[in-house]
Image: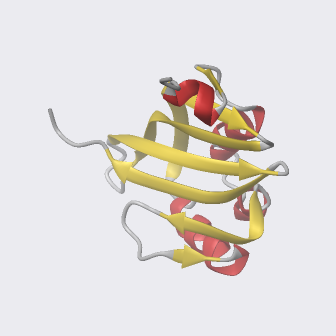
């Protein structure tokens, strides 16, 4: 008997989880305290240009720097979520944009995976999308 991966893993959807949507919308508020509040106390963040960050203090320090960028925004382009036993794994593509020191628009297409449990991010991996 063959068991499909989707049935084994749980329910699959293209809808981004509410917590992820809130996280994305919050980026433009540029508030590192609020951004950090989406993460569990001992969460792991594998950010694009940083070493592994563990815990809210390290994650907060990361967001202080990231959210200092002028007019920073984030938008989801593609999402695939698997929900099973209270755990949500959301993977997809998002785009960050901000203005640099010359006031030029910088656009960074990236990919992500968020692992969410009990309405908190417990693991987050983000990396620049590879060139085609």
User: Residue 97: percent from the left, percent from the top?
Assistant: 43, 40
Query: Please, which residue is most extreme toward the right here?
Result: 118
- Residue shown at the point (58%, 38%) measured from the top left: 90
Task: Give residue 1's position: percent from left, percent from top.
Answer: 50, 23
- Residue 30, given in percent of the width and then of the height, sits at 66, 53
In the displayed structure image, the side of residue 61 where residue 42 appears, left or right: right
Q: Which image quarter: residue 85? A: top right
| Residue drawn where x is 45% and y is 41% of the image | 96
Image location (x, y in percent) of residue 99: 41, 46
Position of 37 with respect to 65 (left or right) is right
Nearer to us in this view, 91 or 77: 91
- Asked whether the viewer can see residue 71, the reply is no
Task: Give the colour scheme of this rendering.
Answer: secondary structure
Foreground pick, 52 / 34: 52
Q: Is residue 13 above or below residue 59?
A: above
Count of marks, rendered view? 0
Residue in view at x 47 percent, y 75 percent: 52
Q: Is residue 63 above or below residue 82?
A: below
């Amino acid at each position: 008997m063959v068991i499909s991966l989707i049935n084994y893993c749980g329910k699959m959807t293209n809808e981004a989880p509410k917590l992820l949507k809130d996280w994305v919308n919050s980026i433009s508020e540029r508030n590192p305290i609020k951004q950090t509040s989406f993460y569990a106390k001992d969460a792991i963040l594998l950010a694009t240009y940083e070493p592994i960050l563990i815990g809210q203090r390290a994650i907060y320090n990361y967001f202080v720097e990231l959210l200092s960028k002028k007019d920073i925004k984030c938008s989801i382009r593609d999402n695939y979520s698997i929900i099973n036993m209270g755990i949500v794994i959301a993977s997809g593509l998002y785009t960050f944009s901000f203005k640099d020191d010359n006031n030029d628009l910088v656009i960074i297409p990236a990919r992500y995976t968020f692992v969410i449990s009990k309405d908190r991010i417990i693991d987050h991996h983000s990396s620049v999308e590879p060139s085609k």
